[in-house]
Image (spheres, rainbow, N blue to C red):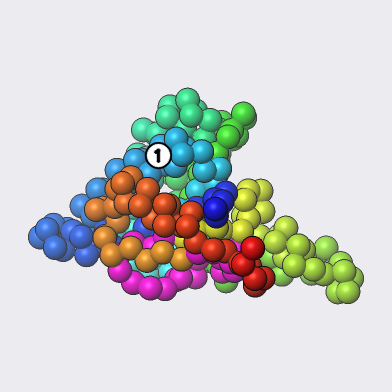
Amino acid sequence: MAQINHLAIIMDGNGRWAKNQNLKRVEGHKKGANIVRDIVTHTRRLGIKNLTLYAFSEENWGRPKTEVSTLMKLLVEFMTSERKTLLENNIHFHPIGNLDKLPPFVKPLLKKLDRDTQKDSVMELNLALSYSGRSDLVNAVKNIVKSNINPKDITENTITENLSTFNFGKDVDLLIRTGGDKRISNFLLWELSYAELFFEESFWPDFTTDKLDQILSDFYKRDRRFGLISQ
Ligand code: FPP
């Protein structure tokens, strides 16, 4: 049976969901934020140790200002409303990405929640914000060069250790993308090397814990060979 240590999700389709309901795009993001709450607590109940959610990509800065500012406000609301749940359930809130780019009303709150939820944690909730898999790799290369390491000593582990995902279950076991598109969109490029991929037709605001359970039961049946042959 396939084991899951690290689940990653590309939460896509908020805008299209809203359009289908004749609502503004931001309404899709608001509904989407509620689904994040359900999925985080469900993942914790299931005992999955690492959940990484793609909440805002580096490329998303190019969206209209009003949409970006709604997303930032939703993030602040999420951190405020979920603080108690995170602490009670020993979930470490761990933001990753180019966090320096986030607005001043967001950055200190991210840091505080990260720090406050660290102790005794049993699950990592990694929120990818202003995240780009390629930038993360570029930063890793910069750090490696700065460390003056001898090139002959560079291994795959050297790169893994210098990525922003290093502190938790590095390799992704299962990637789910909602919204019907079948692409990776610059997410966790290195860490997805051996991930099982599931592309879900529902838009993120229509995603449910039942749908997650269905995908997981399918995942557990998969024969993960990692380039070897079946046992
Ligand atoms: C993709 O939908 C979704 C995003 C860019 C943002 C994800 C944000 C949330 C789920 C809500 C806020 C999250 C937190 C943690 C508070 P899209 O806008 O690209 O949809 P589209 O492809 O239909 O246009």
Q: Residue 32: x percent and y percent?
A: 29, 50
Q: Amino acid at mark 1?
A: His
Q: Residues within 10 Å of mark 1 (few under 14, many from 20)?
A: some
Q: Nearer the viewer, residue 23 or 122?
A: 122
Residue 194: in magenta span: yes
Left or right of 42? Residue 196 is: right
Q: Residue at (65%, 71%) from the top-left corner?
A: 229
- Residue pictured at 44% horizontal, 71% vertical: 185
Q: What's the magenta region?
A: 176-196
Closer to the camera, 56 or 155?
155
Q: Quadrant of the C terminus?
A: bottom right
Looking at the rendered structure, the secondary structure element under dot 1 is helix
In the depicted view, which residue is nearer to us: 38 or 101?
38
Residue, far left? 22
Q: Is residue 59 left or right of residue 20?
A: right
Residue located beneath label 1 in the image: 42
Residue positioned 26% across, 53% down in the render: 205
x%, y% of residue 220?
Answer: 48, 54
Residue 11 figure quarter: bottom left
Residue 119 can be seen in this image: yes
Whether residue 196 is situated above or below residue 122 in the rendered picture: below
**Vertical placement of 81 versus 126: above or below?**
above
Give the x, y percent position of residue 224: 57, 64
Considering the whole magenta stretch, tell me its main secondary structure: loop
Q: Nearer the viewer, residue 75 or 102?
A: 75
Residue 21 against residue 115 in the figure, above or below:
below
